[in-house]
């Protein structure tokens, strides 16, 4: 409300505008008075009734219907959980029907309310208003409390806004306006909605405000800054043992001390730190004189107990402050400052505890004293200097008041039991639904898809079993049976109809399996006639191995035709001779015989080992240095020129053969 109004300039930057919010939801009724200036909201006061809400009107109408039903039929629907739920649904519908202006009567109609009896009755708006008088009167207390605690004159309230689904009831808005007018709030009841503001969505206002507050607190969203100063809902006091605290001081947000108002003491060892409707977040400093570890306790003040749920433990938290061991040996008991904070979320914490060690100044020498004595007499007396302290942080241990360890373990164990119970109930319901589904589906299939696969005796037997199971499920002990019984019942029913289902599946899948087997036989025979006979790639396969493939194909084909002939003589409601499983086994046998032959690898070519030539004998040193004779050189040249014929031709032939070997070898197309 404040963010949009502030953005549109409805608020002043200096003069606050006071607005009252009346929230009448499903379970509670609250009244909040807030002050607005541009960009800032301050909660001034808040009051509520946690037991007054829209559900109270639903209970009122439901009890009215139950009383009328009991007077007519003699049974109370509130004693039956299912009937009670139907009552509450009908009551809520009647309340919504009577909400718009001009509607004076609602027709209540409930089918099979209890004992298979329907119920109808009229419900008039006049009766509704008369019966709800006590609920309407209860709204006055929170409204008056909020106006009184705020300290704002009723005439200074600028607007009264209403939210919550229950504010849609016309007589609720009328009574709110009457109470506010009686308190002195300037409202024009003749205006629309009895002069009450309906700026916000009645159902989504809280959710939208929560989203905006989350965006303001988050660092990932960039929104226009809007300051919210909340109020303390319940007064909180701090208690301790061992005498009074030396001082209780208030601090601002930055931690600087503020002089003036101090906490209200409620006893020798306690003080109310955070009063009701006081601004929050806030912090207080409590100073103790202690030389040993001590404990302080934060709890709700006695004034807050009437507003809290019954039998609630007022203790919030306990804090133990440890002190150094050397402190206990000092002559003077040291000061310990405890910083207690009421944070943005309404949680009371001890943010820190500090040991205040006084810093003593060294005394001045006697010569300086004599020089300053004359000046001190002439000068006016200066105020005494403040003592300076050194702050030493102390460890603080926090213990939250809650469930003890045995109670917590018992609660966890109970939760595990309830989870197991829910799982058993869910599985039991699923098993019951499986039995019910099988009964209906099998009954339809007996006269439908499975009809040709049942003999007359089997059909009659299965129909009788399904009828008996249905009677047991709805009219016998089957509705509240255990999971194991449902599983056993379903197994028995499936065994009776299993033969027909098996025959149906065989008839549906047999043709596909036959085609697969025939195709395998044809593929292997084609291989024998084509590639195995003509291709060089399969020249390594012997005739005996080809005969194995040929015989395997012939055996499989002979078996298949024989089985088909036998199967053709049988009716559909007789167990088949040729099954899909048998066809699959036969095909696997065929593949196991033929595939190894077909995929037989070629033998590797033999590699001839190269003979190692003997190394030439080393020449003598004298030969290597001697010069060859001229005649020998001449003869060698003649041999070279004259013998070029044979040796040259042989060299050319070797070169041609090498080139021929380098040409690519033509490959078979199939390979």
Image: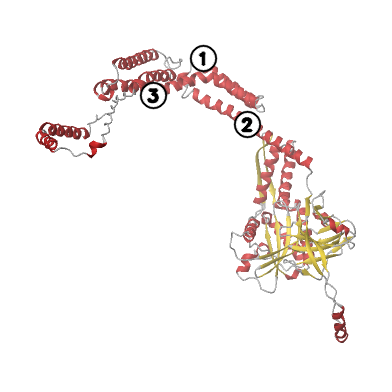
For label 3, the residue is 512
Q: Is residue 561 left or right of residue 271?
A: left
Q: Is residue 519 above or below residue 47?
A: above
Ranked by sequence position, the earlier of labels 3 and 1 is 1
Q: Residue at x 81, y 64 (%)?
A: 356
For label 2, the residue is 427
Q: Quadrant of the C terminus?
A: top left
Q: Residue at x 79, y 49 (%)?
A: 401
Q: Nearer the viewer, residue 145 or 240?
A: 240
Question: Does the CB distance between marks 2 and 1 fall below 8 Å?
Answer: no
Query: How far from the left and from the top, in percent, is residue 121?
Result: 68, 43
Query: How far from the left and from the top, in percent, is residue 510?
Result: 41, 21
Q: Residue at x 51, y 18 (%)?
A: 459
Ranked by sequence position, the earlier of labels 2 and 1 is 2
Q: How many marks?
A: 3
Q: Nearer the viewer, residue 341 or 633?
A: 633
In the rendered image, which quarter is residue 422 located in? top right
Q: Neighbour class for label 1 at 10 Å: few (<14), some, many (≥20)?
A: few
For label 1, the residue is 457
Disc number lying in front (3 or 1): 3
- Element on which disc 2 rests: helix
- Element on which disc 3 rests: helix
Task: Give the CA distance from mark 2 to mark 1.
Answer: 35 Å
Q: Nearer the viewer, residue 100 or 494?
A: 494
Q: Residue at x 26, y 37 (%)?
A: 621
Task: Give the CA distance from mark 3 to mark 1.
Answer: 31 Å
Q: Neighbour class for label 3 at 10 Å: few (<14), some, many (≥20)?
A: few
In the rendered image, which quarter is residue 80 located in? top right
Q: Is residue 544 above or below residue 100?
A: above
């Amino acid at each position: 409300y404040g963010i949009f109004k502030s953005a549109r300039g409805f608020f002043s930057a200096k003069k606050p505008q006071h607005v009252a919010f009346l929230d009448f939801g499903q379970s509670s009724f609250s009244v909040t008075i807030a002050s607005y200036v541009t960009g800032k909201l301050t909660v001034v006061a808040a009051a509520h009734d946690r037991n007054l809400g829209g559900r109270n009107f639903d209970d009122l109408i439901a009890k009215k219907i139950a009383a009328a039903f009991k007077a007519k039929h003699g049974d109370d629907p509130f004693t039956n959980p299912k009937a009670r739920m139907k009552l509450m649904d009908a009551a809520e519908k009647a309340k919504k029907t009577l909400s718009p202006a001009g509607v004076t009567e609602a027709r209540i109609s409930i089918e099979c309310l209890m004992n298979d009896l329907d119920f109808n009755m009229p419900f008039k708006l006049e009766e509704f208003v008369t019966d709800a008088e006590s609920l309407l009167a209860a709204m006055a207390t929170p409204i008056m409390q909020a106006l009184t605690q705020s300290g704002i004159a009723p005439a200074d309230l600028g607007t009264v806004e209403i939210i919550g689904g229950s504010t849609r009831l016309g007589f609720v808005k009328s009574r709110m306006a009457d109470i506010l007018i009686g308190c002195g709030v300037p409202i024009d009841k003749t205006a629309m909605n009895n002069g009450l503001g309906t700026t916000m969505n009645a159902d989504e206002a809280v959710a939208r405000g929560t989203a905006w507050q989350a965006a303001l607190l988050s660092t990932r969203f960039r929104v226009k800054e809007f300051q919210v100063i909340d109020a303390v809902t319940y007064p909180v006091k701090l208690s301790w043992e061992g005498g009074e605290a030396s001082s209780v001081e208030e601090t601002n947000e930055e931690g600087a001390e503020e002089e003036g108002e101090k906490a209200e003491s409620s006893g020798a060892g306690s003080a109310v730190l955070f009063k009701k409707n006081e601004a929050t977040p806030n912090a207080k400093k409590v100073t103790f004189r202690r030389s040993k570890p001590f404990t302080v306790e934060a709890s709700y003040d006695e004034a807050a107990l009437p507003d809290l749920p019954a039998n609630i433990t007022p203790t919030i938290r306990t804090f133990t402050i440890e002190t150094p061991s050397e402190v206990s040996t000092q002559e003077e008991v040291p000061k310990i400052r405890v910083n207690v904070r009421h944070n943005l979320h309404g949680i009371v914490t001890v943010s820190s505890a500090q040991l205040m060690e006084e810093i003593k100044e060294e005394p001045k020498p006697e010569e300086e004293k004599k020089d300053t004595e004359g000046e001190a007499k002439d000068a006016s007396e200066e105020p005494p200097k403040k003592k300076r302290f050194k702050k030493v942080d102390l460890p603080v241990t926090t213990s939250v008041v809650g469930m003890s360890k045995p109670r917590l373990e018992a609660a966890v164990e109970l939760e595990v039991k309830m989870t197991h119970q829910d799982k058993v109930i869910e599985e039991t319901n699923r098993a019951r639904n499986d039995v019910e589904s099988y009964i209906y589906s099998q009954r339809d299939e007996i006269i439908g898809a499975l009809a040709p696969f049942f003999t007359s005796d089997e059909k009659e037997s299965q129909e009788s079993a399904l009828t008996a199971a249905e009677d047991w499920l709805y009219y016998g002990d089957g509705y509240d049976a255990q999971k194991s019984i449902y599983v056993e019942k379903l197994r028995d029913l499936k065994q009776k109809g299993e033969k027909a289902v098996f025959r149906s599946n065989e008839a549906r899948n047999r043709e596909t399996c036959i085609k697969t087997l025939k195709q395998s036989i044809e593929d292997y025979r084609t291989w024998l006639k084509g590639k195995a006979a003509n291709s060089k790639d399969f020249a390594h396969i012997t005739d005996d191995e080809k005969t194995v493939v040929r015989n395997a194909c012939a055996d499989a084909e002979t078996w298949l035709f024989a089985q088909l002939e036998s199967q053709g003589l049988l009716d559909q409601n007789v167990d088949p001779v040729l099954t899909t499983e048998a066809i699959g086994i036969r095909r696997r046998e065929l593949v196991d015989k033929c595939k190894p032959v077909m995929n037989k690898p070629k033998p590797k070519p033999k590699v001839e080992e190269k003979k190692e030539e003997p190394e030439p004998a080393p020449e003598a040193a004298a030969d290597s240095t001697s010069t060859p004779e001229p005649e020998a050189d001449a003869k060698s040249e003649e041999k070279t020129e004259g013998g070029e014929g044979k040796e040259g031709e042989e060299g050319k032939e070797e070169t041609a053969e090498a080139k021929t070997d380098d040409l690519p070898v033509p490959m078979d197309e199939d390979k």
